[in-house]
Image: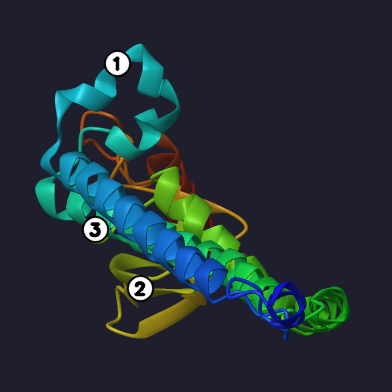
Amino acid sequence: MVSMLSVLPSATTDPDGISITGIVISLGVGVAVWLVATFVISRITSRVAAGSNFFKKRTFKWVAPALRALDHERRVQRAETIGSLLNSVVGVLVVVITGMYVLQNLDINIAPLLTSVGILGVAIGFGAQQLIRDFLAGIFITIEDQFGIGDVIETSEVVGVVESMGLRITRVRSDDGAIWYLRNGEILRVGNRSQGRYVPLHEGPTGTTDQSSDHSAENTKTEQKAGE
């Protein structure tokens, strides 16, 4: 009797090395972490969009640029952009980590897989350098509040009003009505005429005509008289 029981396999041992319990636990923990992270990010972005005073404490001093006094539409746009970015990052991390644990519970050696993914990531990184650069620039433009929808900006290519902003492309309407699509990674210098005290070059601080233009006009008239 004892010998027969010893020959039978244990009910808790899987001969294939697959742990169903581990798979279920990994998936459950991954889903729970994703739901909690999504809820927290949603609450944070809603508070930022509403202009809550909670984030003006010293503890959240690092997020001060995103909480600058702005109109409601622009603040909501920034909050939604940052929230979408955080949700994407958290989703990718949760999927990757959960997938690794599930593969381990399936008794699959993930070391060669990680090596292949690393090589593929390096290849994609070299091939998509400009795309990554555009996305990173768009993220920092949004967080640092360099400009927003409705602002009049001046770049090396165009002067116009920002009509839409994305993580990769900024759309600007110039004075002549043309629509410019600027890649964020190519915007090396930008002047925001809506944030500072912009004064046109042909006008002085009090709205009077600039003296240099007056002098140039007088010199032109003098030269014309001398030519006659």
How many numbered marks are there? Answer: 3
In the rendered image, the vertical position of residue 19 relative to residue 151, given as above or below? below
Residue at the far front: name it.
1
Give 222 or 212, whichever is nearer the viewer: 212
Q: Residues within 10 Å of mark 1 (few under 14, many from 20)?
A: few
Could you tell me which quadrant the N terminus lies in?
bottom right
Residues at marks 3 and 2 touching, judged by CB atoms closer than 8 Å: no
2 or 1: tag closer to the N-terminus: 1
Give 193 or 59, whichever is nearer the viewer: 59
Q: Nearer the viewer, mark 3 or mark 2?
A: 3
Q: Nearer the viewer, mark 3 or mark 1?
A: 1
Q: Amino acid at mark 1?
A: Lys
Q: CA distance from mark 2 to mark 1?
A: 35 Å
Q: CA distance from mark 3 to mark 1?
A: 22 Å
The residue under label 1 is 57
Residue 21 in sight from this viewpoint: yes
Label 3's element?
Answer: helix
The residue under label 2 is 172
Label 1's element?
Answer: loop
Label 2's element?
Answer: strand
Q: Is residue 62 left or right of residue 186?
A: left
Q: CA distance from mark 3 to mark 2?
A: 17 Å
The residue under label 3 is 77
Q: Amino acid at mark 2?
A: Val
Q: Position of residue 227 (x, y in %)?
A: 54, 63
